Amino acid sequence: MRFLFLIIIIACLVSAFVAVFVVPAEDRRALVAVIRDQIPGEWIPVDWLSGDWLPADLLTPVTLDPGGQPMTPAASDAIERIQATSGEAIGDWIYDCPATLTDGRDCTLSQQVSDADGAVAFSWVISIDPMGRFSAKWQVATGIMVNRGIVLDAGTPQPIRLPYAFCVSGYCEASANLAEDFVTTLSTITGATATVQPVEGQALFYVISTRGLADGLRTMRAAAARS
């Protein structure tokens, strides 16, 4: 009986290996589409299957190293950290903009929260391109429940849930284009929060200061208008 059970497990592992590494991406996406139709629930995109979709309840907030073992900061020197931003301070935000906007470089306005060790734990970067279009990305250090996303409370009638676009070894990132109405709202709010759910313990609330946010957004618009 034990031998039969072992054979079944090995067969499942081999099938999974073939599905991920041997089956062409187009066929794999078709297979995932069939599974998605059969399994109810929230589905979000993840980069480690090249944009395929997985149900949120099948994701696991654990990063594996090439040897297949759970990766922790102490066990690996290759963890990708959230990069600290730099530039001119506008209130509690950091403004960074080249002299001339190009397609390869946008103006940014950012605010970050660091942990007790000084590492960036949360980052919100707002960007504007030469056409005056706003976008944003939010990065959160790993150790979080991936399927919960980020809950952003920033002046909208109801908080916005942002699904993660991808995760790397040290952080997960959500991104979005910002509608003009939302940018206008950001210019008027007096406070904002971002909430994430860690793997263990209570939810984490990142308090986002809006001091300088309206001025920063106006400065970004002016820079885009000059390009």
Image (tube, helix red, strand yellow):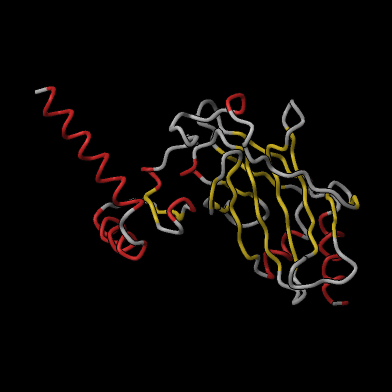
Question: Where's residue 63, x and y in %?
Answer: 50, 36
Q: Is residue 82 above or below residue 130?
A: above
Residue found 90% across the figure and 50% down from its top: 89
Question: Where's residue 111, x and y in %?
Answer: 77, 47
Residue found 79% across the figure and 50% down from its top: 210
Which one is in front, 3 or 210?
3
> In the rendered view, does 77 fall on the left or right side of 57?
right
Question: Where's residue 140, x and y in %?
Answer: 63, 42
Q: Quadrant of the N terminus?
A: top left
> In the rendered view, does 82 fall on the left or right side of 89?
left
Q: Is residue 53 above or below residue 82?
A: below
Which one is in front, 182 or 167?
167
Q: What residue occupies the far left of the structure in this picture?
A: 1
Residue found 83% across the figure and 59% down from its top: 214
Q: Quadrant of the C terminus?
A: bottom right
The image quarter in which residue 115 lies:
top right
Question: Where's residue 68, x and y in %?
Answer: 43, 33
The image quarter in which residue 220 lies:
bottom right
> In the rendered view, does 225 fall on the left or right side of 196?
right
Q: Is residue 97 above or below residue 153?
A: below
Q: Is residue 175 visible?
A: yes
Residue found 69% across the figure and 70% down from its top: 180
> In the rendered view, does 79 fall on the left or right side of 126?
left
